[in-house]
Image (cartoon, helix red, strand yellow):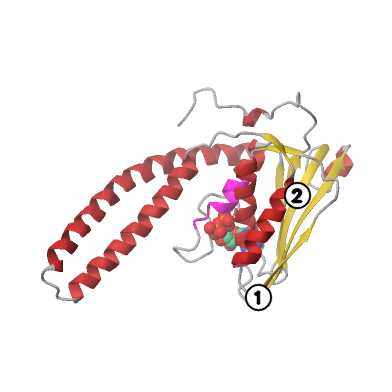
Amino acid sequence: AEEALRQSQKMDAVGQLTGGIAHDFNNLLTGVIGSLDLIRTRIAQNRSGEIGRYVDAAMASAKRAATLTHRLLAFSRRQPLDPKPVDANLLIVFMAELLKRTAREDIDVEERFTEGLWLTHCDANQLENALLNLVINARDAMPAGGRIVIGTANLSAPDAAAAAGHGVTPGDYVVLSVADEGVGMSQDVMEKAFEPFFTTKPIGQGTGLGLSMVYGFVKQSGGHVRIQSQPGRGTTVTIYLPRYLGADMPVPAAARPAPEGRA
Ligand code: ADP
């Protein structure tokens, strides 16, 4: 619990810092892009070829940087949660379809549903986002191809002993998992994987925000997330979300709006 608190305070601080920097940076980039645009129109009459290419390259980089700052801004802005009863099986169907249409040929996607899956109570858009992040990570972890298994399950952990095996607190959970046969994570990577901006991917491919967003969403929804991984064998990320227990279900404290509503 202490670890979770520390992590969430860190996320808050990083979020504020990121928001400030991203905002200023974005203004600077607007200046850079505007100036490059001007240079381009000036040299258009006087095409010396080479200069034009440099300007185009600078413009492309500036636009990539702008995209990144937009993502940082979106990350730092606490999206208010809109929790509703959700059938996670439906989200998984959608996700698997998307994956089959867009993934590489050498990646197999398998769905393993539980019939009669309980409803969970969370923000469906953010759950979809979280799953998308997990699926993208699974794909990136399999440069040589392989299988991604997306599954759902009901878990009743009525007492401490039953819950301990899953690293959760006692209760009823809707479980979602994304398993891959990819490169896996070393102990060191696994320990840092949830930290904002931690990435082992090349610049431009990884932001290091995927798993920290998953973590933030799951915690805000009153759930848990766990990584199991073996280097060279693969990784399974499991999300435990609280079961929906009817309209008067208590809302987890973290999902209530912050007292001094931060933008
Ligand atoms: P990003 O994907 O942008 O790097 P994430 O926060 O989603 O950011 O992931 C952080 C790091 O955790 C990744 O760079 C990678 O090293 C590791 N990781 C995440 N998912 C997996 C996975 N399924 N298999 C292996 N490593 C993973």
Identify the residue under disc 1. 106
Whether residue 177 can be seen here: yes
Which residue reaches farthest left? 46
Please check the rendered image and state whether residue 208 is part of the magenta-colored stretch, yes or no: yes
Q: Are marks 2 and 1 in contact (CB under 8 Å)?
A: no
Q: Where residue 31 appears, x then y in whole percent?
A: 23, 50
Q: Residue at x 77, y 56 (%)?
A: 151
**Stretch of the chain drawn in magenta:** 207-215
Whether residue 188 can be seen here: no
Label 1 sits on what residue type?
A: Asp
Identify the residue under disc 2. 89
Q: Nearer the viewer, residue 255 or 245?
A: 245
58 sits to left or right of 174? left
Q: Decide: is 198 above or below 246.
A: below
Label 2 sits on what residue type?
A: Asn
Secondary structure, mark 2, is: helix
Q: Ligand 1: give its quadrant.
A: bottom right
Q: Residue at x 69, y 30 (%)?
A: 252
- Can you tell which quarter of the image residue 55 is in? bottom left
Q: Nearer the viewer, residue 157 or 43?
A: 43
Q: Where residue 1 appears, x then y in whole percent?
A: 69, 37
Q: Where residue 20 appears, x then y in whole percent?
A: 38, 40
Secondary structure, mark 1, is: loop
Query: Of the residues tagged 2 and 1, which is closer to the observer?
Result: 2
Quarter of the picture containing the C terminus is top left
- Can you tell which quarter of the image residue 17 is in? top left
Q: Where residue 225 appears, x then y in whole percent?
A: 70, 47
Q: Main secondary structure of the magenta part?
A: helix
262 sits to left or right of 97? left
Q: Decide: is 86 above or below 48.
A: above
Cα–Cα gap, marks 2 and 1: 25 Å
